Image (cartoon, rainbow, N blue to C red):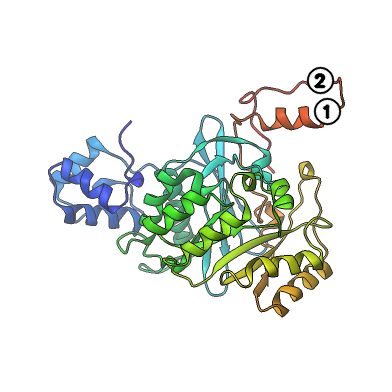
Amino acid sequence: MSPNLLDFDLEGLAAFCEGLGEKRFRAVQLYRWIHQRGEADFERMSDLAKSLRGKLAGAAEVRGLPLLSEHRSADGTVKWLFDVGAGNAVETVFIPEADRGTLCVSSQAGCAVGCRFCSTGHQGFSRNLSTGEIVAQLWAAEHRLRVALAMPEGTRAIDNVVMMGMGEPLQNYAALVPALRTMLDDHGYGLSRRRVTVSTSGVVPMIDRLRDDCPVALAVSLHAPDDALRDSLVPLNRKYPLDELLGACERYLSAAPRDFITFEYCMLDGVNDAPEQAQALLRLVRDRLPCKFNLIPFNPFPASGLHRSSPARVAAFARVLQDGGIVTTVRRTRGDDIDAACGQLAGEVQDRTQVARRRARATAPAGRVIPIAGAGAALAGRR
């Protein structure tokens, strides 16, 4: 299979073109055609030398992801399901807002972290996406939206990208960083570092590496004020407990484009939403690092066994944080009528980690064996 040019950031594309005997400025031209104009046909790239177009036709391609479905919410949210092969599909969501267009991008087919409140984690994990598969979501969404919205040339539909789709981005670091560089590059999508956000469950060593390699806005899935509760909600906490995680956040601020860390906190009824837990959060972060909290209404799914906190409890929790001097917002649920809200993205995953089998064994009555199809026997059901 020919190399996919969506896999290359500008430096990688320059090296590829050099291998064809071409100078760097040709790579810049090619990069602009692909990312700024959404062109995949080399013959239509009119200012490229004919000789280069001939070389490219036999040596490379611009290969997007097959689109399986598109769903539009009543609130304008759009969800796409993209085929990534071998029975796997990932979801990408566009959220239109008054001041920006946000794209929520997936980084893995499934997720191995297994947070209790996340539909993706309950489907298990198949594989990491390539750089090209990550970028292809933005590439397709941007140019489909420009056509659908009849936007003038030179304008952008998407000016805010959040790596908050399926998967843990920092567990796919090698593919993530070149994708981020393409998003940021002025010859690519030209996004501000403040408008590209990586959301992580807390992979401490990779937070440090991202600070050095490609610092963008950072959002951390916190969800609990102490290690005991976070261990049960976010299993990664057993490897990287809160003190280590907050230390990495402090270090990240030295290079971050924003002067605060965003903490995401999914509000779970009777689990993590009591006023005394809000007070514990204040003690945890207030004197340690500048931050803001984004309280997220839980989007229930049957396998979770969890329930959404009432609006009154969410408001009371927010009030404690705000009275303590912490900027706190409550995320407005978008796209829930098409299962595109936070925590609902499930796609289709051929689980290699046998999450369903292990969960069934853990919950089965003593002495009873529950037969479950092995990983890869059938597509996980889409939500």
Q: Position of residue 143 (x, y in %)?
A: 43, 57
In the rendered structure, which disc, 1 or 2, sits on the residue that comes first in sequence? 1
Instruction: Please say if the residues under marks 1 and 2 sit with CB atoms less than 8 Å apart.
Output: yes
**Quarter containing the C terminus:** top right
Which one is in front, 114 or 245?
A: 245
Q: Position of residue 90 (x, y in %)?
A: 55, 43
Observer-nearest residue: 334 or 213? 213
Residue 179 rendering spot, x and y as whole percentages:
40, 51
The image shows residue 6, relative to residue 74, as above or below, that is above
Residue occupying image coordinates x 53% and y 61%: 249
Location of residue 29 by image quarter: bottom left
Q: x and y percent of residue 351 in the render?
A: 61, 31
- Judged from the image, the secondary structure of the residue bearing numbered disc 1 is loop
Is residue 331 rendered to the left or right of residue 183? right
Which residue bears the numbered disc 1?
364
Amino acid at pointer 1:
Ala
Q: Which residue is mark 2?
A: 369
Instruction: Identify residue type, mark 2.
Output: Val
For the residue labelled by badge 2, is the local secondary structure a helix, a strand or a loop?
loop
What is the CA distance from the residue labelled 1 to the residue labelled 2? 7 Å
